[in-house]
Image (spheres, grey):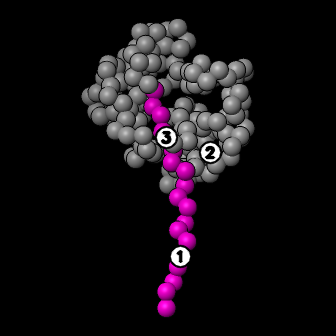
Amino acid sequence: MTTTTTPTPTPSVLTVRAIDPAVHGGLLERDDAGHPPVRSVDGTGGAPLRCCLTRARAGERIALVSYAPLRRWAAATGAEPGPYDERGPVFVHDGPCDGPAGPGWPGGFHGGRRVLRAYDRRGHILGGELVEPETAEEAAAGLLADPEVAVLHVRAVEFGCFMHEVRRG
């Protein structure tokens, strides 16, 4: 007897985007609020670095900057986010960074609950979803399956900080 099975479709490939290296360099001069970065040494390690989507090691030099992720996306796509154009604090390396190891979901970067915020092509919020680290990638794929969703932002629940962007692969 021969059995034929239909393969299960794989979720759409996601592209996870950290802060672009050229943008990172500019933020180390003046951030998106027009201020110089707040430089420090991460004494205990663990600061989530948005330039490479890793956590700082103890003793590593980091910078706290104001970043407007939707504004950056809108400038590249021609969107007009209006009042959804938020700006907030993020940690980055205080110096050059090679960026993430790859375009996939950053393992070990997320330590707690996250909010996935979905935006339409205009840059307006369509909705969001509260997720646990182990379900975040699957939930992101589900949200991006909606053709109305143009981009997702992953944010920390505790402080609302931007973690990274997610797009269709």
Label 1 – label 3 distance at C-alpha: 29 Å
Q: Is residue 149 above or below residue 60?
A: below
Displayed quadrant of residue 58: top left
Q: Is residue 154 left or right of residue 81?
A: left
Mark 1, mark 3: which one is toward the viewer?
A: 1
- Kindly state the secondary structure of the residue where label 3 is placed: strand
Tell me if mark 3 has few (under 14), some (14-19) or many (20+) residues whose alpha carbon lies within 10 angstroms of its own.
some
First in sequence: mark 1 vs mark 3: 1
Left-right relation of 159 to 46: right
User: Mark 1 vs mark 2: which is more N-terminal?
Assistant: 1
Q: Is residue 117 visible?
A: yes
Determine contact: label 2, label 3, CB under 8 Å: no
Pick whichever of labels 2 and 3 is earlier in the sequence.
Answer: 3
What residue appears at the point 61 percent right and 35 percent down from the top-left corner? 151
Q: Which numbered tag is attached to residue 15?
A: 3
State yes or no: residue 10 in magenta: yes
Magenta segment's dominant SS is loop
Measured Cα–Cα span from mark 2 to mark 3: 11 Å
Please tell me how many numbered marks the rendered image carries: 3
Which quarter of the picture shows residue 128? top right
Residue at far left of view: 59
Q: Nearer the viewer, residue 145 or 39?
A: 145
Q: Position of residue 76 (x, y in %)?
A: 57, 21
In the displayed structure, 142 sits above or below 120; it is below
On the image, the x and y values in percent for residue 64 come to 44, 21
Question: In the image, what residue type sits under mark 1?
Answer: Thr
Disc 2 designates what residue? 144
59 relative to 7 in the view: left or right: left
| Badge number at residue 5 | 1
Residue at 51% x, 83% y is: 3
**Residue 19: image location, x then y, percent:** 45, 26
Please report the residue visible at 26 percent of the width from the left and 28 percent of the height from the top.
59
